[in-house]
Amino acid sequence: MKKAPRGKFDIEKMRTLGQEALSAEDHTEALRQIAIADEEFRVNFRWGHTQVNLVKQVADLMGVSYQQYIKQVVFRQAQSDLEQFSKTV
């Protein structure tokens, strides 16, 4: 049976949650997974190999994963753009 990408629940179990009562352990785990989902957002975009390879090279030099590097760079750039926009308004 395939496992769900996060947590201990498998896909079939997730489909039947509304049909049966959860154990105390499963209920706690479900609440934990809901809290995680409420805090995280996934962003998907398409890039070419050239762009991804460049980002991976730089991330490696910085000692972080390329996903973490992208998050850091985008966040810093957004802060900078917001500061620049605030000065022009």
Image (cartoon, helix red, strand yellow):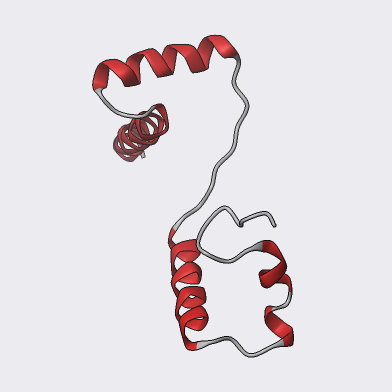
Where the N terminus falls, by quadrant?
bottom right
Residue at image coords 35%, 38%: 75
Residue in front for this viewpoint, 29 or 71 = 29
Q: Position of residue 73 (x, y in %)?
A: 35, 29
Residue farthest to the bottom, as pictured: 21
Does 49 sit left or right of 14 as displayed?
Answer: left
Q: Farthest residue toward the left?
A: 62
Q: Answer above or below: position of 82 versus 9.
A: above
2 lies above or below 69? below
Picture coordinates of residue 89, whole percent (x, y) = 36, 40
Nearest the eye: 85 or 63? 63
Residue drawn at the location 29% of the way across and 37% of the way down: 83
Residue 86, image quadrant: top left
Residue drawn at (52%, 75%) of the image: 30
| Nearest the eye: 16 or 54 | 16
Which picture quadrant has residue 2? bottom right
Question: Horizontal and vertical percent for residue 29?
Answer: 47, 74
User: Number of callouts in the render?
Assistant: 0
Q: Residue furthest top?
A: 50
Provide residue 82's location: percent of width, then percent of height: 35, 39
Q: Is residue 61 left or right of residue 21?
A: left
Residue at point 27% right, 15% down?
61
